[in-house]
Amino acid sequence: MTKRLLLIYLLVVAGCMLCAQPNIQKQLQRKFVDAEDNTVIEIAAGNFNLDATLWLDGVKQVTIRGAGMDKTKLNFAGQLSGAEGIKITNSANITLQDLTVQKTKGDGVKTQQVTGIKFLRVRTEWTNGPDEKNGGYGLYPVQCNHVLIDSCEASGASDAGIYVGQSNHIIVSNSKAWQNVAGIEIENSTHADVYNNEAWDNTGGLLIFDLPDLVQKKGGYTRAFKNHLHDNNYKNFAPKGNIVGKVPPGTGIMILATNNVEVFDNKIVNNNSSSLGIISYYLTENPIKDSVYYPYPAGVSIHNNYFERAPVRATSQGRMGKMFRYKLRFGKKVPHILYDGITDEKMPARICLWNNTNQSFANIKAANNFKGISHDASPYNCQAEPLPAAVVNMQ
């Protein structure tokens, strides 16, 4: 084939690909809109440029299946309609698997009011890297029941890469999160198991939060175990006003105002500000207007974890960073476990620390303006009953 014929051939192929993109979008949108119960939506291998959300609503027993995370890529860089890449609502027993969602205007994949949702080998990413203009969440099930996230990946989210909020009966396993503000976050959710995951190069590796002003008020009964949470020292790039904007770079795990949490058998390494923080909502300095919100952590059990960090100073970024610099002044010897010491006088905190390797501790006495900081962990040397395993039922 001559160079001229080759050039003509390449131009024809490129032109066909450009023409095919709108047709592919219409085909996919039609598949989502017309989906009936007990069907499979197949998405072939390829890099597809889409400009509108793919929305699935009101169905049961539907599988959305690509050819693999590295083979089926849905790119929403030119998104004109909607904010999410894929949105699934008011449904039951849905499986999303083997594909990548890229560069969405808002959240990568959002599922809301779904009972029985499985994410298997799904990746969300913003390939331009960390940026406050990126979408807030990668994988984002909210107000769901029976959630399974397994062997997934998330990077670039300006809030949380892998997030489960206001949901019940949850497993997040065998997944990876990097260069997000929060790698993995469990918020106002109950009966969650988070295990065998790796989170690195985020601002915070794993956040377990209860926040005010949400529909589901209380979270709890969360177990985090056998995770590798390391080198989460990336600058906080959350948009101004987001609660995760309070998380200081260098956070391995943060437990905020939630109850009944068990953290064990994790490897928590080189998170420069706080390997593990146990704090009340008062430390955020945000006002509380929710009359039924409980702002204290309680029933927290930390055991059999491995801690390690290099002798470096904690962050000075943000309000909490200033706390490290001007109030705590640990220098290069920041204790692995930090407890703010803000307690409910009517109810004991029930915090237990035992059998951790390289454990160091500080009660930073935040309610006393950080005066009288104590490194004595003996008041918390107790063993709590193990929490029950999360049970996720999929039909």
Image (cartoon, helix red, strand yellow):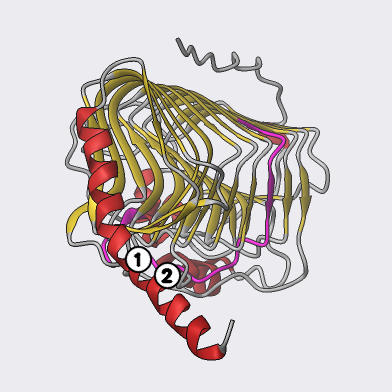
Q: Which residue is mark 2?
A: 13
The stretch of residues the image draws in magenta is 224-243
Q: Are marks 2 and 1 in contact (CB under 8 Å)?
A: yes
Picture quarter containing residue 237? bottom left
Do we see residue 341 in this rendering? no
Q: Which x, y percent locates residue 47? A: 45, 58
Confirm whether the magenta stretch covers residue 238: yes
In the picture provided, is 90 more to the left or to the right than 2?
left
In the picture provided, is 344 more to the left or to the right than 152?
left
Looking at the image, is 219 positioned above or below residue 377? above
**Where is the N terminus found, in terms of image quarters?**
bottom right
Looking at the rendered structure, the kind of residue marked 2 is Val
Confirm whether the magenta stretch covers residue 254: no
Q: Which x, y percent locates residue 333? A: 73, 66
Q: Name the residue rendered at 57%, 66% in the picture.
A: 328
Picture quarter containing residue 354? top right
Q: Nearer the viewer, residue 171 or 386?
A: 171
In the picture provided, is 44 more to the left or to the right than 294?
right
Q: CA distance from mark 2 to mark 1?
A: 5 Å
Q: Secondary structure at mark 1?
A: helix
Q: Name the residue rendered at 46%, 76% in the picture.
A: 9
Do we see residue 143 in this rendering? yes
Looking at the image, is 314 positioned above or below residue 353? below
**Where is the C terminus found, in terms of image quarters?**
top left
Looking at the image, is 150 positioned above or below residue 306? above
Q: Which x, y percent locates residue 366? A: 46, 53
Looking at the rendered structure, the kind of residue marked 1 is Cys
At label 1, counting other C-alpha atoms closer than 10 Å, the crowd grade (few under 14, some 14-19, many 20 or more) is few
Q: Which mark is residue 16?
A: 1
Q: Nearer the viewer, residue 36 or 342?
A: 36
At label 2, counting other C-alpha atoms closer than 10 Å, the crowd grade (few under 14, some 14-19, many 20 or more) is few
